[in-house]
Structures are given as C-alpha cells and as structure tokens.
Amino acid sequence: MGKILVADDNPLSLDFFCEAIALTGHESIAVADGSAALAAAREQHFDLLVLDARMPGLNGVEVLAEIRANNGVNQLTPTLLSTADGALDRNLARSQGFVDILHKPIGLAALHALLARHLPAAADRARTGDVLDDALAADNTGGDASIVAALRGLFASELDALPDELDRFSATVDREGLYDRLHRLDASAGFCGAPALSKSIAALRERLDAEASWPHAALAELLSTCMDTRRALG
C-alpha cells in the first residue's frame, strides 16, 4: 500500500484525511505547516503528497516549488493541492505543478476516488489488463466492437459521477439507495467487461448484508476499483 503525506494547518481536516486514508489501507503522515511538510518530503519518499494552499510559513505552492527544484526523493511525486477556496480550479493547480485539486470540504467517496486516481499503484493496476476484459465485453454485447466502444464511453461518464452519488448515500445512510445503485453499476460493469469491478460490487453487497454499520472500508475498495477501471477506459 502507499504512503501519503498530508499537510494542513486545520486539525479537523488533518484528522479527517488521515482517517479516510486509513480506510483505504494506505498509510498517512500528517504535518501541520509548510516547513514540516518540506522537511518530511526531504527525509522519506511518499507515493502521494496532499498540500494545503494556505499554511503558516510556506504555503502548499511554495512547498511544492521547493520539492520540484531539488533532486530529492519526492521531486516527481504526484501532488494534490487542497483548498477551501472555490475560486481555485484544476487548471490553475496544474499550472503550478499539481496533478489535481482537492476542494474542501470533500466527501469520503470523492476523496477516495481522488486518491485512487492519482496513487501510482492505481495506474500500475490499470495497465495490467485485469481491469477490463475485451472478450467478456464482446460476449455480453453480441460481438459488436462499435457497441462496446459506445457503451464504454457511457460507462466512463457513469464512473466520473459515481463518487458524488456514493457520498450522498453515505450522508443519509441510504442502504436501499446504495443497493439499487450497485445493481445498475453491476449491469454496466457486465456489459463493458469490467470483472474486477463486478467482484468489488459483490464484496460490497456482502458487507451490506452482513453488517448493520455503514461499510466505509468496502466502499473505499469499490471506489479504488472504479478509478482503476476509469483509468483503463482512457
């Protein structure tokens, strides 16, 4: 599993990020200011950095600039810019060297999707060929490649919207709504030849049946597989 550095001067944000990361099985290192973030990034390698835009001392942009300017262990590590400023957008963040932007507050499912999208391990899994099965998709759609391509285009859009949908179910503890959404997602995965996602859906259904509590960990695993699948779709 990956190691993630999280830098934020808000203790509540730090606690949320670290607990959310733990649900995915990844390890987090938390620091409360830019200087501590820079020191940590110089001492050990991380698989992902999450830097707040506004922190005492060095802000997130300044921290990343220092990291990129030196030939250190995290010079090429993908980095997210976290911010509560809705005026900051992804394009601006990318122009400053970040791979994406994390707007606060963020729902659990949306955060897990963002982490899964940018952790290097996710890209490796998506390249293995285990995420999409072209032969299975062909069998399930009558062997017409044009139909498979069209369905996978729709499937990509469905996966893009899924994190926000799952966050709404989590916010209201809507088990029935989640069951229904999983049923529709499973149908999409079947038509598009996404066996890994079908397995994750089945695992989440089992947790829903077996546990009275909300299945945060199983949802995190589902989102990780969804992002692997989305990456493989291109």
Image (cartoon, rainbow, N blue to C red):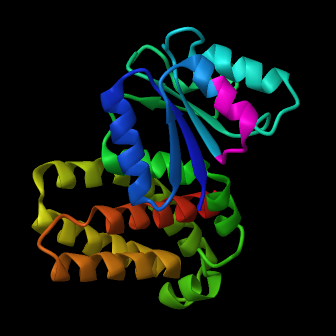
On the question of residue 161 being in view, the answer is no
- Secondary structure mainly formed by the magenta segment: helix
**Where, by quadrant of the figure, is residue 148 drawn?**
bottom right
Q: Position of residue 37 (x, y in %)?
A: 60, 26
Whether residue 2 sits left or right of residue 166 in the image: it is right
Q: Residue at x 72, y 44 (%)?
A: 45
Whether 119 is drawn above or below 136: the answer is: above
The residue sitting at 72% across, 42% down in the picture is 44
Depicted 203 relative to depicted 229: above or below:
below
Q: Position of residue 82 (x, y in %)?
A: 48, 27
The reply, left or right, for residue 17 in relation to residue 151 is: left
234 displayed left or right of 217: right
Front-most of residues 9 and 138:
9
The percent coordinates of residue 97 (x first, y second) are 70, 25
> Can see residue 115?
yes
Q: Nearest the camera: 219 or 137?
A: 219
Magenta stretch? 38-47
Left or right of residue 31: residue 134: right
In which quadrant will I find the N terminus? bottom right
